[in-house]
Amino acid sequence: MTLHKEGKATILIALTGVVAIYIILRYFLPENDIIHVLWLLASLVIMGLVLQFFRKPSRSLVQNENQILAPADGKVVVIEEIVETEYFNGPRRQISIFMSPVNVHINFNPISGVVKYFKYHPGKYLVAWHPKSSTDNERSTIVVEHKSGKEILFRQVAGALARRLCWYVEEGKAVEQGTEFGFIKFGSRIDIYLPLDAKIHCKIDDKTVGGQTLVAEW
């Protein structure tokens, strides 16, 4: 397991902050060993939390052109038929995966194909489980066309804590199933919009592993 590149700045800021506070405490309270020990313990907890936010586990890549894999670690919170209005303008099957602060925050391509559409939307920071978070929150929308001609849309949705979306895709470029397409700092959710005839292989409250868990197939 290693640390993700998106965490470098945050880890440096956190480390600088805890060290600076310790120096201040040593300067103004030089004899108060209890305070010094308590802050050292708190610093270990803080740095441990920050490091686990940006962990990058080693995972084997197994591709299957008929399968749609989970784009993120987390829990399935929505499976429903909706009308998708940004790209398809028609009915699709939506699967939403909620990423908590303790999940891995890397996002993985659910299928291989070519990026046909990408758009970033500034927006609000409603809690990730709010019904309007998929349409009102800061988000990025990506559509990938499979070699069969079928398309799926997946959307990074920021939440109340997630204040930065990162993506590594570009319209017209090919992506491979199971590889990284982005990162959401401090959790949130990923929505996937599938054709109605896709066979769903997950249910509400299922735990997913990004790039490995089968959520649907066609």
Image: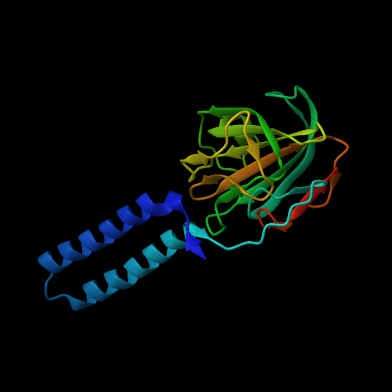
- Residue 32 position, x and y percent, is 16, 75
Query: Split into 4 quadrants, where in the image is the C terminus?
Result: top right
Task: Give the residue at x 26% y 75%.
Answer: 37
- Residue 131 position, x and y percent, is 66, 36
Which is nearer the eye, 88 or 68?
Answer: 68
- Residue 96 position, x and y percent, is 69, 44
Which is nearer the eye, 65 or 207?
Answer: 65
Q: Is residue 207 above or below residue 109?
A: below
Which is nearer the eye, 149 or 108?
Answer: 149
Task: Give the residue at x 52% y 55%.
Answer: 101
Task: Give the residue at x 64% y 33%.
Answer: 142
In the picture, measured across the screen, residue 148 lies left or right of residue 54, that is right
- Residue 99 position, x and y percent, is 60, 51
Total residue callouts: 0
Q: Using the rendered view, name the quadrant where residue 196 is placed.
A: top right
Which is nearer the eye, 119 or 180?
Answer: 180
In the picture, measured across the screen, residue 14 lies left or right of residue 100, that is left
Q: Using the rendered view, name the quadrant where residue 51 is placed.
A: bottom left
In the picture, measured across the screen, residue 168 lies left or right of residue 149, that is left
In the picture, measured across the screen, residue 21 lies left or right of residue 148, that is left
Q: Is residue 164 above or below residue 214?
A: above
Task: Give the residue at x 46% y 41%.
Answer: 163
> How is the structure coloured here?
rainbow
